[in-house]
Amino acid sequence: MASAEGLHAARSRGRNTRQLVHEVLRSRIVGLELEPGSAVSENDLAAELGVSRTPVRESLILLADEGLVDIYPQMGTFVSRIRERDVASAQFIREALECAALREAVGKATARDVAELRVLLTAQEEADRQSDMEGFFQLDEEFHARLMAASGHASAWPVVSQAKAQLDRARRLSLPLTQQMSLLIGQHREVVDLLEQGDLDRADASLRSHLRLVFSDVEKIRAKHPELFSDEDTPLKPRRDSTRRTASRGDG
């Protein structure tokens, strides 16, 4: 969790306060430090981060535009619950861009590209052995970014990353619930093998199957934690323990 000291250090290097506050809050929401349905207080956040209410308010407006918070006049601001339609939209964008990039990468990827992807696979296997879900999540991000870079379109990854915030919340929830790191690593390895072999159609099919796994995961997560999801635009009753890490939940 970012501290006031960290924010002040970044501001001293010329970073915009509103941008910094937005990054901190977005990271907390996507990382599930702020749970779906939890209440958000402008005053509390401003005091904690050592800033005025203005950049906090402006950041919350930006987050509302991204669908990550819901602002209700006279009621308050809440972290948005996960909406399956938003997950589906994010998945559509991600699949379209990543698969298009992969199809360009097949036949273009160098031996160095493949070697770097395999280094990430090894690191993912170590994270799995250590049951390091957060470490695995970050390595998964690096893997997909590197796969896109192999096509020559590394600059497109931030577009994917920005679009998939809702998707990332579901993905973080799925790791402790489904215990499937080894499955995901196996799918990653298959994509790399097919990329190296230059098998365009099978590589494309493999990546699409891998990316669509989130849909079955969402069904499992919703069955286990229905309070974190919503098909409507009505906020949950505010939660008081808003910083609890949902991602640490297991099946017990």
Image: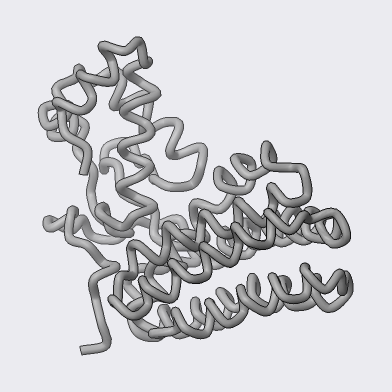
The spot of residue 71 in percent (x, y) is: 37, 40
In the image, residue 120 above or below residue 157: below
Write the residue at 56% across / 63% down: 87
Tell whether 178 sits left or right of 85: left
For the question of whether residue 37 can be seen, the reply is: no
In the image, residue 127 above or below residue 28: below
Tell whether 106 sits left or right of 120: right
Write the residue at 27% across / 87% down: 251
Q: Quadrant of the N terminus?
A: top left
The residue lying toward the viewer, choosing from 202 and 116, is 116
- Scheme of colours in the image: one colour
Tell whether 156 sits left or right of 76: right
The spot of residue 186 in percent (x, y) is: 57, 82
In the image, residue 223 above or below residue 203: below
Q: Quadrant of the C terminus?
A: bottom left
In the image, residue 215 above or below residue 163: below
Q: Could you say which quadrant of the image residue 241 lies in?
A: bottom left
Write the residue at 22% across / 19% down: 9
The spot of residue 163 in percent (x, y) is: 59, 47
Q: Could you say which quadrant of the image residue 170 lies in?
A: bottom left
The residue lying toward the viewer, choosing from 120 and 33, is 120
The spot of residue 88 in percent (x, y) is: 63, 64
Write the residue at 19% across / 38% down: 41
Tell whether 104 sits left or right of 142: right
* Badge count: 0
For the question of whether residue 132 can be seen, the reply is: yes
